[in-house]
Amino acid sequence: MGVALAAVAAALPGRAEAAESSLFVVRGVSVDRTADTATQAREEAIAEGHVLALRQLFDRLVPAYDRANVPDLSAEQIQSYVLDYSVENEKTSPVRYLADLTFRFQGEEIRSLLRSSGVNFAITESKPLLVLPLYGNESHLRLWEEPNPWMRVWSLRHSEDRLVPLIVPLGDLNDISTIDAESVLRGDLGRMRDIAYAYGAEDALITQALISGDLGAGNARLQVISRRAGALQEPIVATLRQEGGESLEALLARAADAVDAQIQEKWKLANLLDFGDRRFMSVAVETFQLGDWLAIKRRLDDVASVESVQITRLARGWSEIDLTYVGDEQRLSVALAQRDLQLTARFDGGWELRLDPTVARPTGGLGGSGTSGDTGSQLGTQ
């Protein structure tokens, strides 16, 4: 067992080789430039896209209070941080260029840039939240029942490339049979968890949009109350008033932006990386079969606050590793939990790490007979 684990540990890719997260992908950057020639318009539009995309990425990672301190880079400087970009919906004329751009940034380079600039940021990704949008007035709220423009507005948003990804249910027969508006309003946690888990989400976000006033007269008032179903947190309350001739869809889209922004901001503030607080921890890791270690190692590679993993002992049942990480134990535990890893304190003051038992365990392993053993090696992976 130990020899097999040692061989696997040596062969596994380190953190530098791990695939970059979609967190560093910025989609839907719309550009529209006019110049003397189509070629010049395109060059200016692409350059503008680089600047806009990096700004969106900084907004995604950096809390509002520190955004004024992010580095101001030119389009030419930004190119060194871009892995690649793609173009969609391209339209040209002799003097105009329009397109939607998608940029993939180099995650490690972006982290280094922010860190060297002294900017606080978060890159710990939460498990997804399933959005349950209730719409109506104080006497009647709808979930699946039409019309529900609040549901439609959320379904049109691209909220997957966030620190807290937001998923909107399809509203198919399975969803309708699982939960209804009344079940949401009375706080039926069992039903809300059932539909959240069906979409691979950790929890549900209940968001109620209550409309009052006269849209036609331009004096409508929208109150939005949002809260996580399974967490004891203060609800997010936003009140918006119709602006000018603003349509209902535009008013609701503005409200969805506000709710999303507050959710992201709360998560960022709770999970900022503090590189001035670097810590070390020895951890016992549950490894009853080969697949356990493979799954745990891959998940550790995805945890941004973990800087290095050093294997000190490999054995059947329990192995031992040394972790170097930034931040405190609480934030480390939260970050690990987002990757289905449970970190628990032992009675003797040590720490244990194991796969979340609610997650399907990896199949395979060595099986059969054999004796547990310690490799005695000091193998490290970083």
Image (spheres, helix red, strand yellow):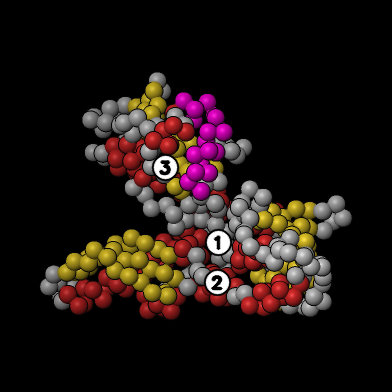
In this orientation, does residue 169 appear? yes
Q: Quadrant of residue 364?
A: bottom right
Chain-order first, disc 3 or disc 1: 1
Report the disc number at residue 123.
Answer: 1
Q: Quadrant of residue 96?
A: bottom left
- The three-letter code of the residue at mark 2 reads Ala
Q: Are discs 3 and 1 less than 8 Å apart at CB?
A: no
Chain-order first, disc 2 or disc 3: 2
Question: Mark 3 = which residue?
Answer: 169
Please state if 265 lies on the left or on the right of 209 as rendered: right
Chain-order first, disc 2 or disc 1: 2
Q: Which residues are magenta?
A: 182-200
Using the numbered discs, state the Cα–Cα distance from disc 2 to disc 3 in whole angstroms: 31 Å
Position in image of residue 220 (x %, y %): 31, 31
Question: Mark 2 = which residue?
Answer: 18
Q: Residue at x 51, y 70 (%)?
A: 19
